Amino acid sequence: MHAILLSILLSIFNTSSDLTVNILGFQNTKGQVYIAVFDSESTFPTFGKQLEAIILDLDSEKMKYTFKDLRHKSYAVAVFHDVNRNGVLDKNLLGIPTEPYGFSKNARNRFSAPTFSQAVFKHLNNQSITIKVQ
């Protein structure tokens, strides 16, 4: 009986859950995909300053990764396809990315990365989001 009550209380006060990021739109399966979770406007979307990140070998035109036990709060996710495996999002002379990328809420601006507020979402329970890279 105590175990059941304890289980119920823990589920009520649970402050973390899983976030699954589904990524679509890869044009090929070369290279790697970088997925980063940000919890701050001041660091978004700078890779290397994220809260959590993963680098995966790309083996399909659709990818999925689950971040385990993320605290319940607001996040924004950034993704890029590192086609040539050099560890950076390549850009042309004008600073425009030449490798596919995407953000949570599929936020996109014409001449710059979206702001944190454009890509932010509230993470409250086990959740799945979809990002399309372009």
Image: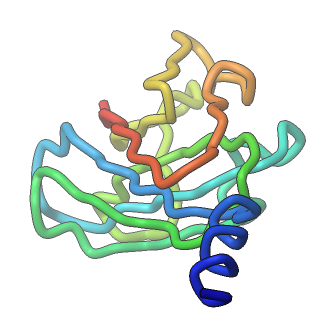
Above or below — where is 133 with respect to 67?
Answer: above
Judged left or right of residue 115, residue 106 is left
In depth, the one of 94 and 73 nearer the eye is 73
Where residue 124 appears, as percent x and y from the top left, is 63, 45
Judged left or right of residue 34, residue 52 is right
Residue furthest front as drawn: 1
Where residue 81 appears, as percent x and y from the top left, is 34, 53
Identity of the residue drawn at 34% across and 40% down: 100
Identity of the residue drawn at 36% across and 65% down: 65
- On-image quarter of the C terminus: top left
Residue furthest top as drawn: 110
In depth, the one of 42 and 9 nearer the eye is 9
Identity of the residue drawn at 49% across and 26% down: 105
Across the whole image, how many numbered discs are drawn on residues?
0
Q: How is the image coloured?
A: rainbow
Where residue 23 appears, as percent x and y from the top left, is 29, 46
Above or below — where is 80 with respect to 91?
Answer: below
Identity of the residue drawn at 30% across and 64% down: 84
Judged left or right of residue 100, residue 9 is right
Image-quadrant location for residue 47? bottom right
Image-quadrant location for residue 58? bottom left
Where residue 13 appears, as percent x and y from the top left, is 76, 62
Above or below — where is 61 with respect to 41?
Answer: below
- On-image quarter of the N terminus: bottom right
Above or below — where is 106 with respect to 79?
Answer: above
